[in-house]
Image (tube, rainbow, N blue to C red):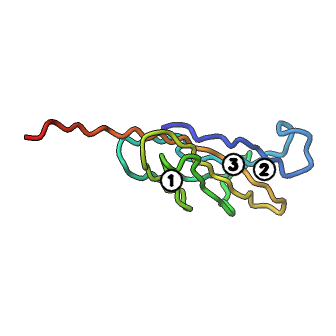
Amino acid sequence: MPLPAVAAIVVCLSACQSVTGADPSRVFELTIVPDQVSFNALGTHQLIGKLKNGDGREFPLGNRVWTSANEEVATVSEEGLVTAVANGTATIRLSADVPSTVFALLTATSEITVQLATQMTGPAR
């Protein structure tokens, strides 16, 4: 099973000099599970967004938005359900609020590959 995608942004929710010296309970990471999906037929796959702090404690996601960078290949619903549409690749992005009195928005991605089997047809008989 692939490891979850690591958020491109790590947020420190206090006055801290660097992430390495930050209070782990105030550093958040957003991931998408799984971080890669391959389709070999039309279908769907559920992605799950997870938000954890540096202590490993999970938090519910606040407001979130799922988007596809290539809807001609794969679409994604408001709930993170990916639908394969055509051959190619697409990046699915999740943006979510960090539950805190300080507003912060994190983003994570999942790579989607669709490689549909080609249908072979023979001569008409």
Question: What amino acid is at disc 1?
Answer: Thr
Closer to the camera, 118 or 17?
118
Give the SS element for disc 1: strand
Other residues around mark 3 within 10 Å, as few (<14) / some (14–19) / many (≥20)? many
Question: What amino acid is at disc 3?
Answer: Thr
Contact (CB < 8 A) between labels 2 and 1?
Answer: no
**Cα–Cα span, label 3 and label 1:** 18 Å
Q: Quadrant of the C terminus?
A: top left
User: Which residue is rendered at x = 79% and y = 47% of the image?
Assistant: 11
Give the SS element for disc 2: helix
Q: Looking at the rendered structure, which numbered label has been put on residue 21?
A: none
Q: Residue furthest front?
A: 124
Q: Which residue is mark 1?
A: 75
Q: Looking at the rendered structure, which numbered label has been put on residue 25?
A: 2
Q: Which residue is mark 3?
A: 107
Closer to the camera, 101 or 35?
35
Q: Point out the tag, 2 or 3, that comes first from the N-terminus.
A: 2
Above or below, 68 against 64 in this view is above
Q: Position of residue 119 (x, y in %)?
A: 26, 40
**Cα–Cα span, label 2 and label 3:** 19 Å
User: Which residue is rendered at x = 79% and y = 55% of the image?
Assistant: 104
Q: Point out the tag, 2 or 1, that comes first from the N-terminus.
A: 2
